[in-house]
Image (spheres, rainbow, N blue to C red):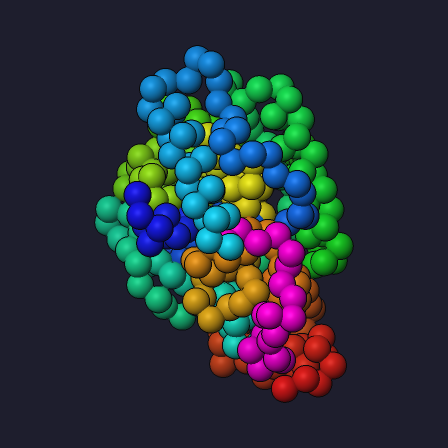
Amino acid sequence: MNLAATLRRVTALVCALAVAGCVVSPQAPISSVAAPGRPAAEAAHSPAASAASEAIGQHFAQVQMELLSNGLLRSDGGGTDTPYTERMLAENFIRIALYDEYARGPLGPVQRQTESRLRRWDVPVRVALRFGASVSADRRATDTARISSYLDRLSRLTGHQISLSDTAPNFFVHLVNEDERRALGPTLRSALPGLSAGEVSGITQMPLSTYCLVYAMSDGDSGRYTRAFAVIRAEHPDLLRLSCMHEEIAQGLGLANDSPRARPSIFNDDEEFALLTGQDELMLRMLYNPALTPGMTEAEARPIIFSLARSLLGGES
């Protein structure tokens, strides 16, 4: 696999639940506390994993090594080499929060940039982790601790209640290997009723070019999320695994799109940054600011967004 193909990051999908099912608002699944990574070759998989899962683990170990050797998958959050102004922050936010990368098609998502509405949660986000049998006890403990810490960080940033919980969960994160993911159909249809067969198969038959993904559903055009379902490959080596956690969970909160102009950011398919950056934090703060409301169009939200960006960056232009 060449580097160009390697850099093609996970593309996610956000669905708005309507009478007939989901109205796709795209997202690139997907996410932050910089933690030291294990060696790239240490892909987590069970000794009983199938040959296909073993091969996928080896593939993504190589992918991670290639990305790191090219200076990508940064975990520094951005620095003096990645400056941005209030205008850049505002325009990046508009593109990421108010546009979709994918539209719904009869056979699943179709790549097409379309204007959408502001989406976020207005109820507490209760995240439930679901591990496949292939994930070891040690790996489960590490993943749980990392995700719990990350959710605490997201809750502080947004001012919204976001936590691990198995009490009436509404955001499911599945860490599964190739064989386990292919069997997720019934679980997925139960968690997100209304998905088409093509959309379900988009997860169960997930191509190798997709690292991870998230589906989020809202009630009609309200922009208010009610449920989300993320899938992360258990075969991923340490940093890719953490990167997927960061991006998919953050995108499932409402930053659904990607933009090639967003830098520093994980909402960019170039893989430069593995973990949530300083600009990403500001966008999450903007998204959950009470001055913005779910369902807003770009025209309605634009002046507010520029005002928020100006206040966050102290008038820099």
Could you tell whether 243 is left or right of 151 in the image? left
In this picture, which residue range is highlighted in magenta?
72-89
Q: Residue furthest top?
A: 48
- Examine the rendered structure and indicate whether residue 163 appears above or below residue 70: above
Measuring from the top left, give residue 227's x and y in whole percent: 53, 45
Q: Is residue 43 visible?
A: yes
Q: Nearer the viewer, residue 178 or 105?
A: 178
Magenta stretch contains residue 74: yes
Could you tell whether 177 is left or right of 152 in the image? left
Measuring from the top left, give residue 60's x and y in whole percent: 42, 37
Magenta stretch contains residue 242: no
Q: Nearer the viewer, residue 220 or 128?
A: 128
The C terminus lies in quadrant? bottom right
Could you tell whether 244 is left or right of 110 in the image? right
Residue at left 61%, top 39%? 37
The overriding secondary structure of the stretch rendered in magenta is loop
- Examine the rendered structure and indicate whether residue 201 appears above or below residue 55: below
- Examine the rendered structure and indicate whether residue 152 appears above or below residue 200: below
